[in-house]
Image (tube, rainbow, N blue to C red):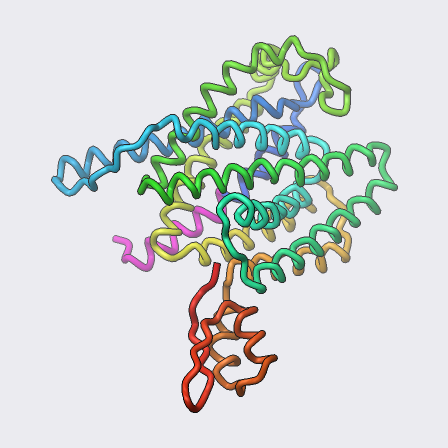
Amino acid sequence: MLTETGLTVFITVIMVVTGACNTLIAKWTDGLKALGQPFEHPFFQANCMFVGEVGCLVVFTIIYMYQKYKDCAPVLVKFNPFLFALPAICDITGTSIQYIGLNLTTASSYQMLRGSVIIFTGLLSMLCLKMQLAGFRWLGMILVTLGLTVVGLCDMLESNTKPNGDEIIFGDILIVGSQILHAVQMVLEQSILQKYDVPPLLAVGLEGTFGMIILSSLLVPMYYIQVPKTFSHNPEHRMEDVFFAFRQIGEQPLIAFGLAAMIVSIAFFNFSAVTTTKRLSATSRMVLDSVRTLIIWMVSIPLFGEKFIPLQILGFLSLILGMFVYNDVFIGPKIRQKILPRLHETPTSVFCAHFWGARVVHDDEELLFNDEEAA
């Protein structure tokens, strides 16, 4: 029988492993060939992701019914489920563009470039939610931008040695651009969750349900839309050839295995991520997410034959450091607890206090810096 600590460790391991598998399995499935073509169906794969999210709704229903049976079910706030349709549309568009980018670039760059969502979320939170960002969050955004620039530079250097170099750069641009939509999605979700106390698993499940329904209904019209060959390696350059996708699945059982594994992995990832946040904290989840990025980078080199570029280490470290600073993990709290209280009252110390989100309290003798997180 697992102890509480053991159970928490087990769940966090599941989160890290399944989080890494989401990207690695998707990239591996892209490379599988059937009927003479690789399985490159970004919209179909995005729909599989939503199927995995629907699994969270199933899990929530089972847990809620069990709690109801035990007479300990929480009271659910009444809200309109269609509120999650708009975030789902953002998720559909952003995820589909992401998978197009994943088809064109490397798995490690894909995972690192997704970190750009911090920049767009911060800016949109200011514009839409009227949040005031503390100085340390701006520093985090600058460090993330620096890391992304280094990752992009590495891809540019690598693209010069490959015949499909332009596609790699274009894939990177698509991934960064898709994060704008994911940032809009996060801001919308935050505004909904601030107004209604919706359980996270229910929110993910509803969003997945709307996403699956909407995207499934769009797959057939996409068959008749032709796009430039950069966006589709389909012989007829269709936006999404869902019929060819099913034929490839029937021809190559490994594709079916990959898609099924991706659905299960996404379902377990969402469940474990929500549980980790509940049992530990959002900052702990942030640290674990950084470990996931490192695993993807390390595994991608031997698995997909990615070239190791030493400069990527600098980009990765800057990216992770920026994420830690922005999310106020380790660095900010330590500065507020250990360094700021030792400073004498000067304009510089007051500036540093405000920069790191500390509340400044004046009294007759000294300046106190209270550890209070700022927006």
Q: Position of residue 152 (x, y in %)?
A: 75, 47
Residue at point 61%, 44% (across, down): 114
Quadrant in the picture for residue 30:
top right
**In front: 256, or 219?**
219
How many numbered badges does the structure rendering display? 0
Residue at the extreme front? 364
- Magenta span: predominant SS is helix
Residue depicted at x 77% and y 20%: 229
**Which sits in the foreground, 160 or 123?**
123
Q: Please give the name of the residue rendered at 46% of the width and 53% of the height, measured from the top-left corner.
A: 285
Please provide percent x and percent y for residue 145: 68, 53
Q: Answer with the quarter of the image where residue 173 lies.
A: top right
Residue 318 point in image, percent of width and height = 67, 60
Is 168 located above or below residue 292 in the figure?
A: above
Instruction: Judge whether residue 10 is colored magenta.
Output: yes
Q: Is residue 5 magenta?
A: yes
In this view, the residue farthest toward the left is 71
Which residue is painted at 50% across and 49% down in the image? Answer: 130
Residue 197: x and y, percent? Answer: 31, 42
Q: List the single residue furthest toward the bottom.
A: 365
Vertically, is 120 above or below 206? below
Front-lying residue, 257 or 90: 90
Residue range of the region highlighted in magenta in the rendering: 1-18
Q: Is residue 117 left or right of residue 146?
A: left
